Amino acid sequence: MAAPDEGAPFLYAPPEAVLDRGTHAKMAGLLHDHRERLTVEQAGRAGDTGAGGGSDVLDVVYLVACYYFARYRHVPDAERDWNRHACTFLFGIVHAVRPETVPQPLRGYFAQEPPAVVPPYEIVHAVGSALRLGSVPVRDRDGVLQATALLLWAREEARGSVSAPHIAFNAGSALTELAEVVGDEGDPERTRAAGLHLMREAIAALPPEDPARQQMLLALMGTQAAAPPPRHPEGSVAAEWFQYMRDGDLDRLDTIVDRLRAAVDAPATGEPARTHRRIELGQALRMRFETEGELADLDGSVSQLTAALTGPLTDDERATAHSFLGLTHLDRYAASGDFADLEAATEAVRHPSVARAAASPAHAQRLTNLAAVLTARFDAWGDVTELDEAVRHLEYAVSATPPGQHDRPVMLIKLAVALWKRGLRTARDTDLDAAESLLRQVAGEPSDTGPNQQLARWELGKLLRTRGLSRNAVGDLVEAVTQYRTTALASTQDVRTRVACAALWGVTCMTLGDRDQARTAFGVALADLLPKLTGRSLGRASQEVRLREVSSLATAAAAVEIAAGRPREALIRLEQGRGVLLAQGLHLRGRHDDLRAASPELARRYERVCAELIAPQRDPGQRRAAAAEFDRLVAQIRALPGFGRFHRPPDWARLKTAAAHGPVAVINVSPLGCDALVLRRRLHRTVVEAVPLSGVTHEEIEQRADAFHTSVRTLAAPGVLGGERFAADQQMKGTLRWLGERIVAPVLARLGHDRPPGPGEVPPRLWWCPTGVLSLLPLHAALLEGEGEPGSVYTHDRVVSSYVPTLGSLLHARDTPAPGAGRTSLVAVAVDAGDTHPPLDTLDDELTATRLLPGPRAELRDADATPGSVLAALRTHTHAHLACHGVRDSADPSHSRLLLHGGDLALRELAAERLPHAEFAFLSACHSAAPGKELADEVISVASAFQLCGYRQVIGSLWTVDDRMAPVLAREVYRQLGTPGAPGAAHALHRAITTLRGHERYREPLFWASVVHSGP
């Protein structure tokens, strides 16, 4: 070894000699040959010059160290670090064995601070990295290949060390660069995939706080951006998937589902192919649910993914199945609100197989799914650390996903949403600004109309609206309107998103004072989009899930029309957006004598498809086919002369006929305003007048409805005495007094019904049509005068009240002829469910009371009153009296039911019946007329289900009925109905309640106010 300064190799060589590629390759190759012996022990074996001896190792180390020392002084700045590392690491060995041979100025530096001796893999890593940086820019194939070999060796040797992720990442980078220079004969796709795998594996192994992680993510993003997009064989399922994610064509998605289902079901499909197809089918079904809303698709997704997890799967495939299953449970949670579904989603996306497959190309997608669950958990419980984790995963996912990959825009949107939520929670403007930038990036230009662009505009609109309201920034609100309007009108977006955007478009315009544009927005939402959102191809439960998302749409639209001075249009908007399922069902059950006369063949086909749509337990495919046939037939019918409005929502010409037999008071309750719309005859014409309800707010009605029903439950509970009972009674009567002062009195004053009827006068009829949660309160029992003591005046003392879910349902009932004289018959059902329910001790008395109605009758008592036998009896009788327990499910009103022997008569079973000769039903069961708080504007109750399946007149209860009162009331109702020339069910109930109020025990509104009449 020569003197350290004068004879050191390469130190005084010209730059071109040092930077010569051949020289670099030779030095790196020399080091590669000695890579196993790059230690102080090997280099320091004195006197041993044989194989593996010390002096030749030291000479090689010294030579290569000098080379990198010289190279460090001549390379560009971008390459200097790795050349410096190579030089320092190698001279570290030299300094440990013969420090005097280290050239200046390193010798002086090392004297003050001796260099650390690093493992051989660190030296090889540094040399490989220096060679890679020198070879890639000039596309030196041999240099890149040699650098890759060095880095791969270092990666294997470094396993388990702190440096392992960094070395693996550089080895992966070298492989991706090698793929660019090896040519087609070198299998570049396989090489690139191996490199990306190592890069992802390295990032996954780093702790989130590692300062190199962000740089790695940026490098990975750049590497994937430069890679050619994957090629899918034309006509393959993969090609169909790729195209669907770009154009959102639902027919294409149906094709994908059909092809995958056929593959799963085909006997020729073996394993593991069948399991792979199950995973794909589960994902396709879930995605179709998100666009079309059919809950059966969600159930099918769970079934397919659960079955797949029992099949032969690699860790990577298992991770994908669990991740997709997590998304399916998340969609279930969004549909049901059941936190058990959210916990199931969390368990699935955090399954250990997901972490084990962190180097998979699909890991970014899985982290996106995990982030979606974490964001939902934040929305549920507000733990910002879960949102922090979601942001971290999404930042990785975006960086680790090629720009051209179909799901990268969705990742960007989810990242923006997570940042936006975090910015709102933490008042961090940088998060809000970053979210806005990401959403604008995805939204692109106004001419970009893909589904992802529209989704980004929806989220951008929400961000701008929230920021505009909090900062009083009009410009943000104006731009939010633009984003909402663009998405609402975009035919490429799914209808669920479009309806939501149309509603927000309208509400934001009202905030800005632009009523005309708000009217346009709500018109788009209700007239154009809502029918598509709740199409007949969906099952009833699926329709209900979708309607929950737009529960206040119609009342908001009506409030806008009222504010614009257009009460007629307000009524039309309410009919378009309330009682949607009821209207659909009534259309399927209506009489069509005029159609039968105009086109018997079309009428026959139409009746057949209506029967198919009503029939229960049809699978989604059959229902979709029947719905498509229904739409085709309706289009043909509308082409007939005089049938242009066939099955369209009623217009003013139709709606005004609802007042033919007396006024109707529609009470509109909305956060945008509360008013009564009084439809009545005046001066020989029909008018609708808006009556302002001063001081009434949506929020107060909700609070009073909750307090009222709490007090009713307290008063109805056994053993409640003293102060508690007095407080509950005062609460109940205070609400009735508030109803009288704020809502009922203004309506009666407008109608001139604010005075008592004269002696011998029959009180006038008044139909109430409350909206929202007001339907839970007894307008017919509002307190007008007094404090609830004997002699107090209630609505009942001024008018004969009836309730209607919608004006359309009232018109349908009037259009349905009552059974002719001598054709009425009654089935009386009495059953005590027992178990945990209070005993019904007066059933025999109630059955006796029903015998006051003349005509044929049948009785079903206790064991004879099974659900099947009761349904069979309803089909053959015009009148029905059911005395039993009723159960109301406020959160899911379609689960409300009557308790019979051996089972329940559920609302959904009733809704599947079609009883063309039904006339009157007396539902002597608790809560039978009470709608749910959820879907209040759909007015879903047991009573409305009886109306849907054919009963024109229904008596039911809003809350718990006193068992001893039931026979007293029934006796008086049937006595009235059995009297020759009786005026009808509404008057019969009104007179019966008048009698009941004279009874010492039942004069309090707790008893008589619970019973209501619905119908014409």
Image (cartoon, rainbow, N blue to C red):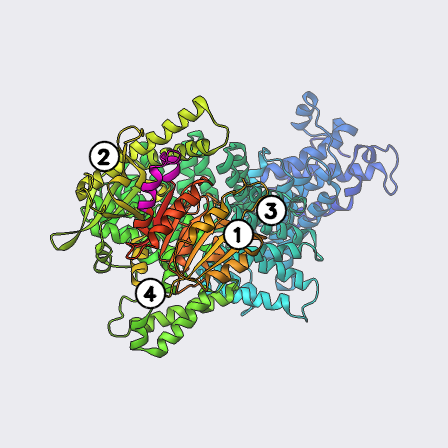
- The residue at which mark 1 appears reads as 402
Q: CA distance from mark 4 to mark 3?
A: 103 Å
Q: Earlier in the sequence, mark 2 or mark 1?
A: 1
Closer to the observer: label 4 or label 3?
Answer: 4
Residue with the mark numbered 2:
694
Q: In the drawing, what numbered circle is on residue 821?
A: 4
| Pair 2/1: label in front | 2
Say the numbered circle drawn on residue 134: 3
Q: Are marks 2 and 4 in contact (CB under 8 Å)?
A: no
Q: Which segment did they paint magenta? A: 990-1009
| Rendered-image quadrant of the C terminus | bottom left
What is the three-letter code of the residue carrying label 4?
Answer: Ala
Q: How far is mark 2 from mark 1, CA to CA?
A: 59 Å
Is 212 magenta? The answer is: no
**Closer to us: 973 or 482:** 973
- Do residues under tags 2 and 1 come within 8 Å of each other at their CB atoms? no
Amino acid on which disc 1 is placed: Pro
Magenta stretch holds residue 995: yes
Q: Residue at x 40, y 54 (%)?
A: 921
| Amino acid, disc 2 | Ser
